[in-house]
Amino acid sequence: MPRTIRRSSLRGQLARLPVVCLALLGSMACTGEEAPPDPDAELRRDPLLRANNYAERAPARFQVTLETSAGTVVIDVHRRWAPLGADRFYSLVRGGYYDDTRVYRIVDGFMAQFGLNGNPYVNQVWKSELLVDDPVVETNSRGRVAFAKGGRHTRTTEVFISYKDNSALDGEGFAPFGEVIEGMDVVDAFYSEYGDGPPRGDGPYQAMAAARGNDYLDADFPELTQIIRATITTGG
């Protein structure tokens, strides 16, 4: 038989509830305890913050499609040309690193460069993920794609597409890992009016682009060509 609770007893229990709740809240305020910070919150938001998860071996040959605001570009990658570079590019594309990024550096008649992530925290992580140089097997002719670098063994995430025969770069250790096979006219149409960055010009400042990401580039250089998405189209 269901238990019946007397109305007077119920009123008494309800009257005591606020006192108990206030006492509980008071004890929490006195201790000053807060929920501990979640160290993995940012990682869950952007897995690219854990660089060691992106070290896949690339197929012997694969293609990458860049969907850009100027049109579509297809890059044919040959792992034998530069194995370490091909592996890094493959892993970054598969991880979505180049999605929603900007072609931030254009030097007319020389090259177009991209590869800074829109999230400055990701840039901070990857700037120390240095690659040992690959031997230069192929020349840096028009349409070839290679990693940018600032000295021996300093390749990280930034790549460039040559606008002309840049064979002079061969002797400096820039090892092409692929070439544009579709959409070189699109590469030629990448927005270039801002020019090179300081100190050679007034275009995007590389250090600022790394430190502030898309917030800086979109605010100060809104016409830059956008890489909407990069995907593996064959292989893998």
Image (cartoon, grey):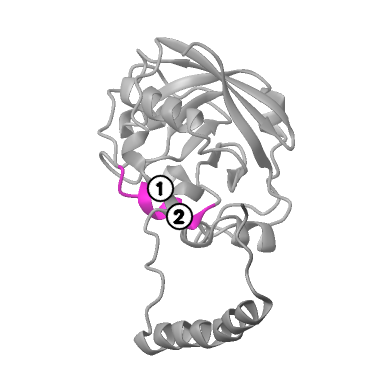
Q: Residues within 10 Å of mark 2 (few under 14, many from 20)?
A: few
For label 2, the SS is helix
Amino acid type assigned to the residue bearing label 1 in the image: Leu
For label 1, the SS is helix
Residue 98 locus on image (x, y percent): 54, 38
Question: Image quadrant of residue 10?
Answer: bottom right
Mark yes or no: residue 202 visible. no
Amino acid type assigned to the residue bearing label 2 in the image: Glu
- Reply yes or no: does residue 208 show up in magenta: no
Residue 144 falls left or right of residue 132 = right
Q: Is residue 118 above or below residue 66?
A: below
Q: Are marks 2 and 1 in contact (CB under 8 Å)?
A: yes
Q: Which residues are magenta?
A: 119-129
Residue 156 falls left or right of residue 4 = left
Q: Residue at 31% across / 31% down in the picture?
A: 173
Query: How would you classify the magenta stretch by its main secondary structure?
Result: helix
Residue 155 locus on image (x, y percent): 34, 39
Residue closest to the far front = 1
Q: Residues within 10 Å of mark 1 (few under 14, many from 20)?
A: some
Q: Residue at 46% across / 14% down in the picture?
A: 236
What residue would you read off at disc 1? 49
Question: Image quadrant of residue 11?
Answer: bottom right
Which label's residue is closer to the chain start, 2 or 1? 2
| Tag shown at residue 42 | 2
Residue 188 falls left or right of residue 120 = right
Q: CA distance from mark 2 to mark 1?
A: 8 Å
Mark yes or no: residue 161 visible. yes
Q: For this rendering, which residue is in front, 156 or 206?
A: 156
